[in-house]
Image: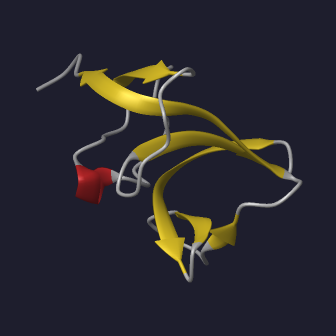
């Protein structure tokens, strides 16, 4: 999947990067994931708060994983097409 925008630039993921994501990978705290929230695809860091999984986008509020949130895949690598 190709990244559009600078939402996770702090994690080294830049606009135009190509992400390699594994839908079979086990979600772990601190990993970047591809999630579907209310029909929108987002990149966010998985974290745990009070024994509950949440998504921490680089901007905006934490998103509690509930019925309208699906963890689609875990980002395993990226390919940078520009330096």
Please indicate whether residue 76 sits to the left or right of residue 69 in the image: left
Residue at the extreme left: 83
Q: Nearer the viewer, residue 48 or 33?
A: 48
* Colour scheme of the picture: secondary structure
Query: Residue 24: horizontal and vertical position, in percent?
Result: 55, 20
Q: Residue at x 61, y 78 (%)?
A: 61
Tell me if residue 35 comes above or below residue 46 in the rendering. above
Tell me if residue 18 comes above or below residue 32 in the rendering. above
Q: Where does the C terminus fall, quadrant-wise?
A: top left
Residue 16 visible in the shown view: no
Query: Residue 57: horizontal and vertical position, in percent?
Result: 51, 63
Residue at the extreme bottom: 50
Please indicate whether residue 78 sits to the left or right of residue 42 in the image: left
Q: Residue at x 81, y 60 (%)?
A: 66
Residue at the extreme front: 51
**Res 64 quadrant in image:** bottom right
Q: Residue at x 47, y 33 (%)?
A: 74
Tell me if residue 31 comes above or below residue 18 in the rendering. below
Q: Nearer the viewer, residue 69 or 57?
A: 69
Q: Residue at x 72, y 61 (%)?
A: 65
Q: How many marks?
A: 0
Q: Nearer the viewer, residue 20 or 48?
A: 48
Tell me if residue 14 comes above or below residue 7 in the rendering. above
Query: Residue 10: horizontal and vertical position, in percent?
Result: 25, 59
Query: Residue 27: horizontal and vertical position, in percent?
Result: 49, 42
Please indicate whether residue 33 sits to the left or right of residue 79 in the image: right
**Res 72 quadrant in image:** top right
Residue 78 visible in the shown view: yes
């Amino acid at each position: 999947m190709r990244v559009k925008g600078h939402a996770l630039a702090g994690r080294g993921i830049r606009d135009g990067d190509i992400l390699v994501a594994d839908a079979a990978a086990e979600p772990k705290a601190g990993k970047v994931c591809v999630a579907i929230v209310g029909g929108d695809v987002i990149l966010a860091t998985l974290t745990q708060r009070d024994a509950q999984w949440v998504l921490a986008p680089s901007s905006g509020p934490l998103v509690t994983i509930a019925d309208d949130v699906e963890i689609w895949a875990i980002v395993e690598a990226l390919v940078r097409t520009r330096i």
